[in-house]
Image (cartoon, helix red, strand yellow):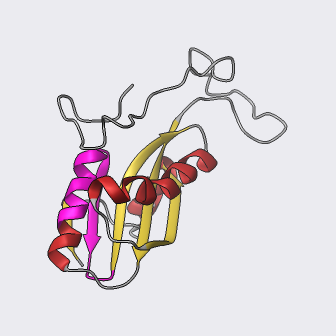
Amino acid sequence: MRRARPGATSRGSAERTLTSVAAGETFPTRSPAPDTPPDSAGTTDEGPRLWHVTLSVSGAEAPIDEVRRALEQLAHDHPFLLTSRYAADHAEIRYWEEARDLHDAAAVALRLWGEHRRTSRLPPWEIVGLEVIDRTTYHQRIAAGYGPLPATPVGIHPF
């Protein structure tokens, strides 16, 4: 499976595309029953889940118009981005990631900025923060009135 909008190609697509890997025997072909007990590690074998990711980056000041343009290109190249907020010296990116567990979602998030730095012409900033929470926790926080605000309006906005 290629991770892109239908019909959209990125400037870096000729070099590399993300593809799916067969799950093998690790994941069942159907979801386990709701009362499936956890294994000895406390997990159930339920396959990929949705994780809400907030990635914070920071560094030396860059022209604000270039930061916005780079984030717009990143959103084009990585269409699962929900919202980005930016300033001349920092940015925050929020999106949903599908992954087997938190470790996999965090690993993908930690690679996002570096892997798209050249193709999206992102500033040479470093990752200074990462939050990865599951869908249930995200919705519990929203319902309780705290936590990350819903990603509306979707898009790229200044802080």
**Which residue of the protein is positioned furthest toward the left in this rendering?**
65
Q: Position of residue 41 (x, y in %)?
A: 81, 41
85 falls in the magenta region: yes
Q: Nearer the viewer, residue 123 or 100?
A: 123
Q: Residue at x 31, y 65 (%)?
A: 122
Q: Residue at x 64, y 18 (%)?
A: 24
On-image quarter of the N terminus: top left
Magenta region, residue range = 69-89
Q: Residue at x 24, y 44 (%)?
A: 11
Q: Is residue 154 visible?
A: no
Q: Position of residue 83 (x, y in %)?
A: 27, 59
Q: Nearer the viewer, residue 149 or 53?
A: 53
**Which residue of the protein is positioned furthest toward the front in this rendering?**
15
Q: Is residue 63 above or below residue 20?
A: below
Q: Nearer the viewer, residue 3 or 63?
A: 63
Horizontal side, residue 143 vs residue 82: left or right: right
Horizontal side, residue 17 vs residue 24: left or right: left
On-image quarter of the C terminus: bottom left
